[in-house]
Image: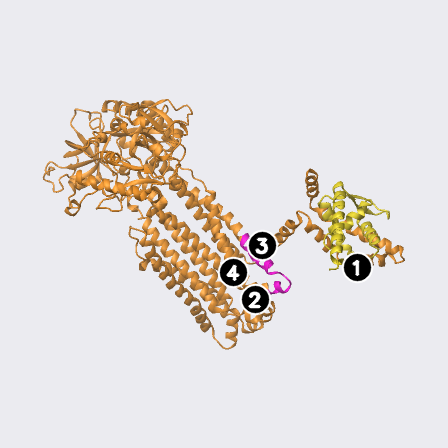
């Protein structure tokens, strides 16, 4: 065995050269020996040699026979043939650069865009949930008002359900809290946490990455407070400390022991993205964390936090049986303790009956599962549609190209190429285009990902600082999309190759002239098909885009000139349990530290700008009126709405708001002094129309405390008017700011604004966060980052989704147009000889053009109608599975598909037609 | 008969190492010219035997003072020759008995 192996290796080692030479040498030696004998028998040397060679036969044939009988010989031979096939294919592709470039780009775009889109979705929502979802069922309460929506239940209902249940599955439940301060040794953050029943992790079967998960004994009222960290929080906030288990941190001000870390990728039962939940604590901790939990266990109340219940159905139990029991319990509860009626001003809503109508649905099929949700299914389908358009184009390109190959194939077949060889040659071409397209696809995917990260990275970091997305090209999507595209090419290349090689060699050769005349009818069917498929796909794409995105109104984007130089940190002192005195001290410390830091031009205390409406706890709301029109007399009851900005005197300079009239806050405007306010131009104009504002008295009703929703009204004198924040043509709220001195007006959410010396405030964001942490370790920022990103972040995100979905549709259309152009112009230029013949027979140029246009447009129009019909049918079919209403295919959509297609067809017809019409009949006839 | 050429080559080589042409000459001699052997067919057979490890090869200088590749039986080759010869004889005996039997 060993000997054989060494021999085998020895056969490999000398390399190709010796491998090929040796048998030849040996055979030559044989012939020489024979010649020697013949010479000895009396022949001349040349004659002897000739005879010896003739006797032996073809040396090469014998050599080949020896070589193919070797272990590697067979492989080498087919590899060699494949290489030469590839070489021929490469040559042929070089000869048709337009075809090649177009095919490669189409393929690359299709693969790249689909791969990037799916990789992005995977990062956000498709990643597996890190637990076995089989049999996991969610309890759904559906309401008469919204039969599709899953409504959470109260704790008391959950307890009742659990106690009345007689059969499987044992239910667990959770509820979420957001913006809970989570303090680690190094920093505080506002985090999302989930309060879960003791059997939560057991039911899911989640194993800890460190320590242990929560268990039933943790959830007994009075048990020691414990928490399990999410992997992302552990990494971001606890620096992936391996000794974190057993340490004590504070969550919502409560000291809790960290007992474990959840495995990477675990994000809760339904949460779509990793990092939304930072920790899991027992439900028994609820009352200490949120006022919503006050007497939530009181059976008389049936109110409080909203719980989602779930369980795991294990065979032999079935979901149906479990649902039946749950339904019975739900009906029983509806009679014993009916739900309170809707409180609504709309009598129709108030009259709706409220029943629990409980059912169990599989997690994988619930809307919590992205791929099962309706929008999710549409989003998932979009890139596939684009890929399909690309594949259709490719298939058609290959199809139309190989139909022009009849002759070449016939010649090759006549020269002895076997059918398999011919098919292999066609396949090689598809393989080459596939390889190049895959390469381009990889680059495109990389480019798209880089672009998306550039656009989204910062807004995401500001919006959800702990969201950890793993952005990368997922190989599985690359492989899947690539395989799909390749399949379409191979099939398209294979069908004509098989068809052509089936044809009789002699006939294909002899009827050459006949074969080279275009068979127009067949080709035009091809074009109609291509147009039909493309149009149908585009229309479906358009319908999906409309379903997925309602493009955000760009008017909501805040003009942020100058905001790039502002770094902002807002702190929800109220929610953090920090009182006014401590908050004032902390803010002073932060501002003092930041002001002297390098790179900082100015720093001030500002509660937030009216623009910050997307950020939770942005500028507080206020209502203003004049003493002449007191609040009660005002028809709206509450006066003019405005954003309340509490700010230190230097804030106007820091934010960059110019004084228009009067004065700004001075040293005298302190607590106890007469109340003063500064109005923005827009607000002043609204309150006093054209009259002067400075010196006037104003009633300001402010939301003093968001938690208690208490409103207090103060009377203040307008001492100045300043420019509108942000400037530009603004929607209502941006122009209306009422500025109050921080000394006189405290708001539970306050912030620090810092202006950087250079153009980009990114560099001083860390200065701000460091100062904050040093000033008070309990301080956690609600939002921290560059002002323009904070202001427009969510809109940037929405706009990104809208534009990327829209550009997918556009890409589909562009590909379809290019594909149509490619095929149609190819087909039309094939008619040159025919045109020459017609010209020779007396047709004039106008006639020729007309002929070509008529021929070219007909299949396109047919295709558009086919496409519309197919899309209509598809839409109806898709609609059946959707409760949300899909938009109808309207005139705008059809024309947005049809007009570009007809345009592409016109160009595709006109250019070759012009050439064809110019054909010299003599040349054309000679060609014939 | 398939395999006969290989068997004959093994037999030839059992009398000592030889190069390809020498094998051919010896074969003609052994069979008394009763079997015509395609010169070209010899070499694939030799290489097959080499691959099966039944013969070893070595380049050497022939009696004509030419470079030639010499083939020599390995121990395994000898064993195979014995087995094949026995098999052959048995088959021939059986065939003969069968064909000659008068019933």
Q: CA distance from mark 2 to mark 3?
A: 25 Å
Instruction: Point out the stretch of residues depicted in magenta.
Output: A410-432
Query: Is the Cβ of the residue at disc 4 closer than 8 Å to that at disc 3?
Result: no
Among the chains pictured, the one given yellow colouring is B
**Which secondary structure, mark 3?**
helix
Q: Position of residue A324 (x, y in %)?
A: 27, 43
Q: CA distance from mark 1 to mark 2?
A: 39 Å
Residue indicated by mark 3: A90
Residue indicated by mark 2: A503
Mark 3 vs mark 1: in front: 1
| Left or right, A693 with reference to A402 | left
Q: Above or below — where is A698 with respect to A52?
A: above
**Which secondary structure, mark 1?**
helix
* Sequence-earlier tag: 3 or 1: 1
* Sequence-earlier tag: 2 or 3: 3
Q: Position of residue A874 (x, y in %)?
A: 35, 57
Hue used for the chain lettered A: orange
Residue indicated by mark 4: A495
**Same chain for the residues at labels 2 and 4, yes or no?**
yes
Q: Position of residue A555 (x, y in %)?
A: 28, 46
Q: Is residue A422 magenta?
A: yes
Give whichever of A217, A823 is nearer the camera: A217
Chain to which mark 4 belongs: A
Q: Above or below — where is A498 with respect to A312?
A: below
**Same chain for the residues at labels 2 and 3, yes or no?**
yes
Residue indicated by mark 1: A54
Q: Position of residue A199 (x, y in %)?
A: 32, 31
């Amino acid at each position: 065995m060993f000997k054989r192996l060494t021999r085998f290796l020895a056969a490999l080692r000398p390399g190709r050269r010796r491998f090929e030479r040796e048998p030849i040498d040996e055979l030559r030696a044989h012939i020489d020996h024979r010649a020697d004998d013949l010479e000895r028998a009396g022949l001349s040397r040349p004659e002897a040699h000739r005879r010896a060679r003739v006797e032996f036969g073809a040396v090469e044939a014998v050599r080949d026979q020896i070589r193919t009988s070797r272990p590697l010989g067979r492989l080498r031979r087919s590899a060699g043939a494949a290489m030469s096939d590839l070489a021929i294919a490469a040559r042929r592709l070089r000869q048709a650069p337009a075809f090649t470039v177009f095919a490669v780009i189409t393929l690359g775009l299709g693969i790249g865009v689909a791969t990037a889109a799916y990789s992005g979705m995977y990062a956000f929502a498709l990643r597996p949930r890190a637990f076995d979802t089989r049999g996991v069922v969610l309890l759904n309460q559906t309401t008469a008002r919204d039969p599709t929506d899953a409504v959470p239940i109260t704790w008391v209902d959950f307890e009742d359900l659990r106690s009345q249940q007689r059969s499987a599955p044992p239910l667990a439940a959770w509820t979420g809290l957001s913006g809970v301060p989570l303090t680690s040794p190094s920093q505080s953050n506002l985090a999302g946490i989930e309060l879960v029943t003791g059997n939560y992790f057991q039911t899911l079967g989640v194993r800890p990455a460190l320590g242990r998960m929560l268990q039933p004994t943790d959830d007994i009222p009075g048990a020691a407070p414990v928490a399990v960290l999410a992997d992302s929080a552990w990494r971001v906030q606890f620096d992936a400390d391996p000794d974190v288990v057993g340490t004590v941190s504070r969550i919502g001000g409560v000291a809790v022991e960290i007992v474990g870390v959840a495995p990477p990728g675990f994000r809760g039962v339904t949460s779509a993205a990793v990092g939304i939940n930072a920790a899991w604590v027992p439900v028994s901790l609820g009352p200490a964390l949120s006022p919503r939990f006050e007497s939530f266990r009181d059976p008389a109340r049936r109110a409080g936090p909203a719980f989602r219940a779930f369980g795991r159905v294990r065979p032999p139990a079935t979901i149906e049986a479990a649902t039946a029991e749950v339904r019975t319990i739900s009906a029983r509860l509806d009679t014993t303790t009916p739900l309170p009626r809707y409180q609504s001003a709309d009598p129709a809503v108030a009259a709706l009956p409220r029943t629990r109508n409980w059912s169990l649905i599989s997690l994988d099929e619930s809307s919590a599962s992205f791929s099962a949700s309706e929008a999710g299914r549409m989003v998932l389908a979009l890139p596939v549609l684009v890929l399909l358009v690309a594949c259709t184009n490719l298939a058609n390109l290959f199809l139309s190209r190989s139909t022009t190959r009849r002759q070449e194939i016939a010649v090759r077949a006549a020269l002895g190429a076997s059918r398999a060889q011919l098919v292999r040659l066609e396949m090689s071409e598809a393989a080459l285009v596939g390889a190049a397209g895959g390469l381009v696809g990889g680059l495109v995917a990389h480019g798209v990902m880089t672009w998306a990260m550039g656009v989204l990275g910062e807004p995401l970091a500001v919006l959800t600082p702990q969201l950890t997305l793993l952005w990368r090209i997922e190989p599985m999507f690359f492989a899947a999309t690539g395989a799909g595209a390749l399949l379409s090419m191979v099939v398209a290349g294979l069908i004509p190759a098989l068809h052509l090689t089936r044809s009789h060699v002699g006939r294909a050769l002899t009827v050459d002239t006949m074969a080279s005349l275009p068979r127009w009818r067949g080709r035009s069917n091809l074009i109609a098909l291509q147009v039909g498929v493309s149009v149908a796909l585009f229309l479906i794409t358009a319908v999906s885009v409309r379903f997925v995105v309602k493009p955000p109104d760009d008017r909501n984007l805040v003009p942020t000139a100058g905001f790039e130089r502002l770094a902002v940190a807002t702190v929800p002192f109220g929610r953090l349990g920090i009182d006014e005195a401590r908050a004032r001290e902390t803010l002073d410390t932060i501002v003092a530290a930041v002001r002297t830091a390098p790179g900082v031009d100015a720093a001030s205390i500002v509660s937030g700008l009216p623009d910050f409406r997307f950020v939770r706890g942005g500028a507080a709301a206020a209502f203003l009126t004049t003493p002449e029109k007191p609040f009660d007399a005002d028809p709206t009851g509450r006066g003019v709405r405005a954003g309340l900005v509490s700010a230190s005197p230097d804030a106007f300079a820091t934010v960059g708001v110019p004084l228009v009239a009067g004065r700004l806050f001075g040293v005298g405007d302190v607590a106890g002094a007469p109340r003063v306010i500064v109005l923005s131009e827009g607000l002043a104009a609204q309150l006093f129309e054209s009259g002067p504002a400075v010196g006037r008295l104003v009633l300001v009703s402010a939301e003093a405390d968001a938690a208690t929703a208490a409103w207090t009204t103060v009377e203040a004198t307008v001492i100045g008017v300043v420019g509108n924040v942000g400037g530009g043509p603004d929607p209502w709220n941006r122009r209306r700011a009422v500025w109050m001195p921080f000394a006189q007006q405290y708001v539970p959410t306050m912030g620090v604004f810092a202006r950087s010396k250079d153009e980009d405030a990114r560099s001083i964001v860390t200065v701000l966060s460091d100062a904050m942490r040093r000033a008070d370790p309990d301080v956690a920022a609600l939002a921290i980052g560059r002002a323009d990103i904070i202001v427009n972040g969510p809109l940037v995100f929405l706009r990104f989704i809208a534009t990327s979905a829209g550009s997918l549709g556009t890409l589909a259309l562009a590909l379809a147009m290019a594909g149509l152009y490619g095929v149609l112009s190819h087909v039309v230029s094939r008619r040159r000889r025919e045109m020459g013949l017609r010209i020779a027979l007396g047709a004039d140029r106008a006639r020729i053009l007309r002929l070509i246009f008529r021929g070219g447009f007909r299949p396109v129009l047919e295709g558009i109608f086919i496409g519309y019909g197919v899309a209509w049918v598809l839409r109806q079919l898709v609609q059946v599975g959707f409760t949300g209403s899909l938009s109808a295919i309207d005139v705008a959509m059809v024309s947005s598909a049809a007009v570009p297609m007809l345009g592409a067809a016109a160009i595709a017809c006109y250019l070759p037609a012009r050439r064809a019409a110019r054909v010299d009949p003599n040349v054309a006839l000679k060609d014939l | 008969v398939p395999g006969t050429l290989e068997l004959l080559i093994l037999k030839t080589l059992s009398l000592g190492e030889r190069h390809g042409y020498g094998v051919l000459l010896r074969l003609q001699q052994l069979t008394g010219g009763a079997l015509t052997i395609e010169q070209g067919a010899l070499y694939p057979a030799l290489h097959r035997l080499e691959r099966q490890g039944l013969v070893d090869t070595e380049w050497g200088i022939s009696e004509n003072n030419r470079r030639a590749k010499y083939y020599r039986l390995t121990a395994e080759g000898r064993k195979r020759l014995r087995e094949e010869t026995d098999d052959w004889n048995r088959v021939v005996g059986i065939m003969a008995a069968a064909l000659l039997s008068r019933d």
